[in-house]
Image (cartoon, rainbow, N blue to C red):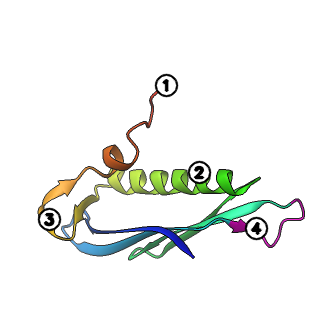
Amino acid sequence: MRLATSEYIAKNTAGDSVSLMLSLYTPEPDPKSEQGDYRCKVEIQGISFEKYAYGVDSLQALCLAVETLRLTIESLIADGWSFYFPTHLDEPFDFTSAYFPMTGLRL
């Protein structure tokens, strides 16, 4: 079951655009685990991305899924991709600052 979703338009350096649906799924028991571990699916429709993040409990699996999403988006940005809200194609959206403002911050 999807826990959270968000839609964007992404443009690459060649100017090609693709509609993306980012989804985090509800953590679930890992069917391959004998220790009771959990997994949480991360999916990005539009670029055929689907991975599971695994944790010792549901909270850790969810946190690692969010980190998987962050690293994937940062990799796309480093490759020259930019993100837009579907209703605001005139201005790129600063994805990492909006969703991961604490990245690199130390307390």
In the rendered structure, the answer to whether residue 53 lies left or right of residue 99 reads right
Local crowd size for mark 1, using a 10 Å CA cut-off: few (<14), some (14–19), many (≥20): few
Kind of residue sitting beneath label 1: Arg
> Element at badge 2?
helix
**CB contact under 8 Å: marks 1 and 3:** no
Q: Earlier in the sequence, mark 4 or mark 2?
A: 4
Is residue 51 left or right of 58 when viewed as pictured?
A: left
Magenta stretch contains residue 30: yes
Tell me the distance, in whole angstroms, between the alpha carbons under discs 4 and 3.
Answer: 39 Å
* Quadrant occupied by the N terminus: bottom right
Q: Is residue 84 above or below residue 71?
A: below
Q: What amino acid type is highlighted by mark number 3?
A: His
Q: Which residues are magenta?
A: 28-35
Return the disc, 2 or 3, that comes first in the chain's sequence.
2
Residue at mark 1: 106
Label 2, on which residue? Answer: 63
The percent position of residue 93, horizontal first and vertical second, equals 23, 54
Along the line of sight, the residue nearer the viewer: 27 or 13: 27
Residue at 38 percent of width and 77 percent of height: 46
Gap in angstroms between the C-alphas marked 1 and 3 = 33 Å
